[in-house]
Image (cartoon, rainbow, N blue to C red):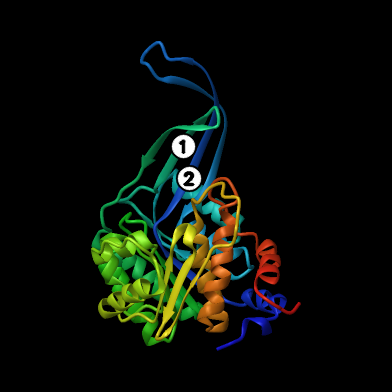
């Protein structure tokens, strides 16, 4: 196991730019309508929001890709979009961020997920969700899998991240086929699961639920969090999944990892928390990159833990700032070289 005080973080972060990653899963458009509220509607007892600006952002699995791209790594987003204006807008946003879109699939039978947030007086007044959450139809499944195989054969990625938001893209067939295809080619896999297909992710490299998802998936009532309890959760998950590494986020308590008999709870570093949204996306992105680059589970967990805390200092869903993370790694991980 690599000793953390021998890590040259400048060299390591430069190395991350050479990692090739695919993010497969539910991608969405996040739309914000900002406005002023000065009166109540005469038609119904609701506020009238006078919209003064609109903003579109990359959401869902696309936010994981944004976090990967923050390290200048090569990242491809592989998903199914609707053949619609929202899909075109989302693709433009991805291309502006230099996220690969060449393997996206356009479907005539689905719409692009768009979550519209109406904000007035610095408060979210309403959210409108335009989405389909049904599973992909067989022709869209096959198109997605064909696109994935084409990507792997051409690009030979180091890591594939499966990002599940229960919007229907990651069906059981898609999950099992992708994992098997990666295993046959010795490609690392990481997954951020949701409950619907929680135990479909068999034999992945990194399985990253949060503690609540692990509790619900195993139907366990857990009143305290310690290494023994979390190790028993890892054992129960491993019995069903036969995965390599458990990486369980613990909210304000930090992060737990276990690989074989190597395990630890890494506590959070003291932060001024502004917003926890998007922290899980950052953790899976950073963990996947670090493990692909080093194969070191403790280093992966330490850096991912710092990254998750950093993005919680920002309002809204934001990608990690690689230079801030680099500085924090040097500051918080003892005796790092520079």
Query: For this view, does 104 lie left or right of residue 304?
Result: left
| Tag 2 secondary structure | strand
Is residue 193 placed above or below 239 in the rendered structure?
A: above
Is residue 165 placed above or below 337 in the rendered structure?
A: above
Give the CA distance from mark 2 to mark 1: 8 Å
Query: For this view, does 109 lie left or right of residue 250?
Result: left
* Residue at image location 30% in from the left, 62% down from the top: 222
Q: Quadrant of residue 36?
A: top right
| Disc 2 packing (10 Å; few <14; some 14–19; many ≥20) | some
Q: Which numbered disc covers residue 79?
A: none
Looking at the image, which is closer to me, 256 or 61? 256
Q: Residue furthest bottom?
A: 1
Mark 2–mark 1 contact, CB under 8 Å?
yes
Question: Can residue 265 be seen?
Answer: yes
Spot occupied by residue 74 in the image (x, y as percentages of width and height): 58, 70
Q: Quadrant of residue 336?
A: bottom right
Q: Specify which label sits upstream in the sequence, 2 or 1.
A: 2
Query: For this view, does 149 lie left or right of residue 73?
Result: left
* Residue at image location 43% in from the left, 86% down from the top: 186
Q: Which numbered disc covers residue 117?
A: 1
| Disc 1 packing (10 Å; few <14; some 14–19; many ≥20) | many
Spot occupied by residue 147 in the image (x, y as percentages of width and height): 40, 69
| Tag 1 secondary structure | strand
Position of the N terminus, as image quadrant, is bottom right
* Residue at image location 44% in from the left, 62% down from the top: 250
Looking at the image, which is closer to me, 11 or 229? 229
Spot occupied by residue 235 in the image (x, y as percentages of width and height): 31, 78
Question: Can residue 170 be seen?
Answer: no
Q: Which numbered disc covers residue 30?
A: 2
Spot occupied by residue 162 in the image (x, y as percentages of width and height): 40, 67
């Amino acid at each position: 196991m690599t000793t953390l005080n021998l890590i040259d973080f400048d060299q390591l972060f430069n190395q991350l730019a050479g990692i090739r990653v695919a993010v497969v899963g539910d991608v969405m458009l996040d739309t914000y309508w900002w406005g002023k509220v000065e009166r109540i509607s005469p038609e119904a007892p609701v506020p009238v929001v006078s919209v003064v600006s609109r903003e579109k952002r990359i959401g869902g699995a696309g936010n994981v890709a944004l976090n990967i791209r923050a390290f200048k790594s090569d990242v491809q987003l592989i998903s199914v979009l609707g053949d619609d204006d929202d899909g075109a807008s989302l693709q433009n946003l991805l291309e502006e961020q230099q996220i690969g879109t060449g393997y996206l699939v356009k479907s005539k039978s689905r719409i692009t997920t768009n979550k519209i947030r109406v904000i007035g007086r610095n408060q979210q007044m309403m959210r409108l969700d335009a989405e389909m959450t049904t599973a992909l139809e067989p022709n869209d499944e096959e198109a997605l899998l064909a696109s994935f195989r084409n990507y792997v054969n051409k690009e030979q990625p180091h890591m594939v991240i499966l990002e599940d938001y229960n919007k229907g893209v990651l069906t059981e067939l898609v999950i099992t086929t992708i994992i098997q295809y990666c295993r046959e080619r010795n490609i690392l896999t990481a997954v951020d699961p949701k409950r619907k297909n929680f135990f479909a992710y068999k034999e992945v490299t990194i399985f990253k639920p949060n503690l609540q998802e692990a509790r619900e998936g195993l139907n366990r009532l857990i009143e305290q969090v310690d290494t023994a309890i979390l190790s028993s959760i890892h054992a129960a998950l491993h019995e069903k999944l036969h995965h390599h590494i458990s990486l369980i986020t613990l909210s304000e308590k930090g992060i737990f990892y276990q690989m074989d008999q190597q395990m630890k709870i890494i506590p959070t570093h003291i932060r001024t928390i502004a917003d926890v949204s998007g922290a899980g996306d950052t953790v899976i992105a950073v963990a996947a990159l670090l493990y692909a680059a080093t194969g070191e589970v403790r280093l992966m967990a330490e850096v991912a833990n710092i990254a998750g805390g950093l993005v919680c200092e920002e309002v809204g869903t934001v990608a990690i700032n690689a230079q801030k993370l680099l500085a924090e790694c040097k500051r918080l991980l003892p005796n790092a070289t520079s």
